[in-house]
Amino acid sequence: MDRNDRVYLYDCTLRDGAQTQGVDFSVADKAAIARELDRLGVDYIEGGWPGANPTDNAFFAEPPALETARLAAFGMTRRAGKAVADDPTLNAVIDSGAPALTLVGKAWTFQVEVALGIDRDENLAMIRDSVAHAAARGREVLFDAEHFFDGYKADPDYALACLETAGEAGARWLVLCDTNGGTLPHEVGDIVGRVTERVPGTRLGIHCHNDTENGVANSLAAVRAGARQVQGTLNGLGERCGNANLVSIIPSLVMPEKMGMPTGIGEAGLEHLTHISRFLDERLNRAPARHAPYVGEAAFAHKGGMHVSAVEKDPRCYEHIEPTSVGNRRHIVVSNQAGRSNILARFREAGIDVDPKHPRVNDLLEEVKERENGGYAYDGAEASFELLARRILEGVPDYYHMQTFRVIDERRWEGPHGTTLPSEATVKADINGQTHMTVGEGNGPVNALDHALRKILTRHYPELEDLALVDYKVRILSPRGGTGAVVRVMIESADGHGNRWSTVGVSPNIIDASYEALHDSIVYKLRRDGATPVA
């Protein structure tokens, strides 16, 4: 393949992504994410805007060591009426020490004349002076042509003049920005194609926002039209509707059965894709999007019995790629729409060796349907399903027997402005014929119950010492019941080895439903870790 087909990947999660509402990266977050991006194989990692805030200053003061990616600092062209040497904002970017510098400038006459309030020639001078100033200091310069597509539609000659001015001043990359995300794929393809008649595609980049849900499509259209650098963010983070999602762009761009374009992402990088997507969510304390293309938990999930039967014969029937190629997995969902194919496939996934003609398979299917009719959801609680299946087919050890538990919540007013909300749980359980009773405190009743129960259990089962509850969700199943409604509790658990599993409980009492999910979580871990029952 022609080496000019090589596409370079530029990640701007640490700057553009930080503009997402509710996202606030720490210096440690930035460093950890940068290392993961480097491991993924992207070519450029934009670390932020030096001089704009203390976090970015601290990050560039001690940047993480990168194996292959180039660290980029973001900034803007000089201010109108200032010499480059006298512009502290521009020089803070240059002085950051980053080997690559991305400078943004206007490429739309409307923005130049209305937003900046300057004439067109002054804007071109700002671009020329700033790029030349940075390039003269030995930096690789990228020029972000802000609002390029709107600018091209309004005045193509001026928009192109902005690009050519930056290129002549020493910019390596000229990046076409769809800043308000309003351009559609056919427009992007057409305009990029016309630009390549004046500027080689090997110098063109694309930077799309996602305001029409076309960020990924626009980026791929630009590459098809000749652009050879793609900018985006992990999981599509960004202000408003976000930026183009690199997690979706990369496999669509790289995989042989898709566009098959050469990049710095190898087979190992592709297999790292699901991990880095979920890693970012973990750093942000956000639940991963289950239905995210390629990397979501449901991306290769099959629920209808007919679909499962077809997938069992040949996954290509309903899967466009092999899930493991992007680090994901096939997931056979069990629900009230399930048939025998779902049940048997889920058995294999859970490592349960069962004869397809086992008489209790139908019993299990009916049990699942009856329970889901009562509010249980096993398509999001694989651990609870596995335990249910094993209890019906082969039995599950009784590691302990709960006699009673009691939970007390208290609200204390401490002065005119302060309150505390202590929770306390008393637990009485039998283990190996002996009754144990203890009290635990926690941040809320479920946390207190968990602490109290594990005070007893970890003495006998040290396997539970690294068990952690990482997510807790409650859904009301009978809204008309008001405060007496039936609720479903989903608990996600994890251990020190990176394993995660989900369990479910249902009850009109939220504490009871929580205990049921908690109990399943504990039993699942004990069984999986091979704990010897002492009960």
Image: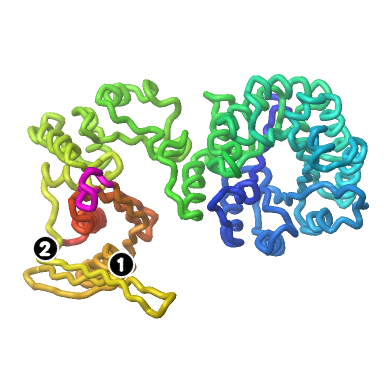
Q: Would you name the residue on which mark 2 appears?
A: 401
Name the quarter where the C terminus is drawn.
bottom left
Where is residue 264? Give x, y as percent.
Answer: 63, 39
Tell me which residue sits at (84%, 58%) in the image.
Answer: 88
Q: Is residue 128 above or below residue 320?
A: below
Q: Is residue 72 above or below residue 190?
A: below
Where is residue 477? Give x, y as percent.
Answer: 24, 43
Where is residue 283? Give x, y as percent.
Answer: 50, 55
| Crowd rating for badge 2 (residues with CA inside 10 Å; few <14, some 14–19, many 20+) | some
For badge 1, the amino acid type reads Glu
The segment highlighted magenta reads 476-487
Q: Quadrant of residue 399?
A: bottom left
For badge 2, the amino acid type reads His
Where is residue 307? Give x, y as percent.
Answer: 30, 23
Q: Is 206 displayed left or right of 132 in the figure?
A: left
* Foreground pick, 291 / 482: 482
* Foreground pick, 329 / 402: 402
Q: Would you name the residue on which mark 1 appears?
A: 465
Which label belongs to residue 523?
A: none
Name the quarter where the N terminus is drawn.
top right
Q: CA distance from mark 1 to mark 2?
A: 19 Å
Residue 122, visible in the rendered structure: yes
Q: Secondary structure at mark 1?
A: helix
Tell me which residue sits at (44%, 75%) in the image.
Answer: 417
Q: Quadrant of residue 97?
A: bottom right
Residue 530, visible in the rendered structure: no
Tell me which residue sits at (83%, 28%) in the image.
Answer: 160
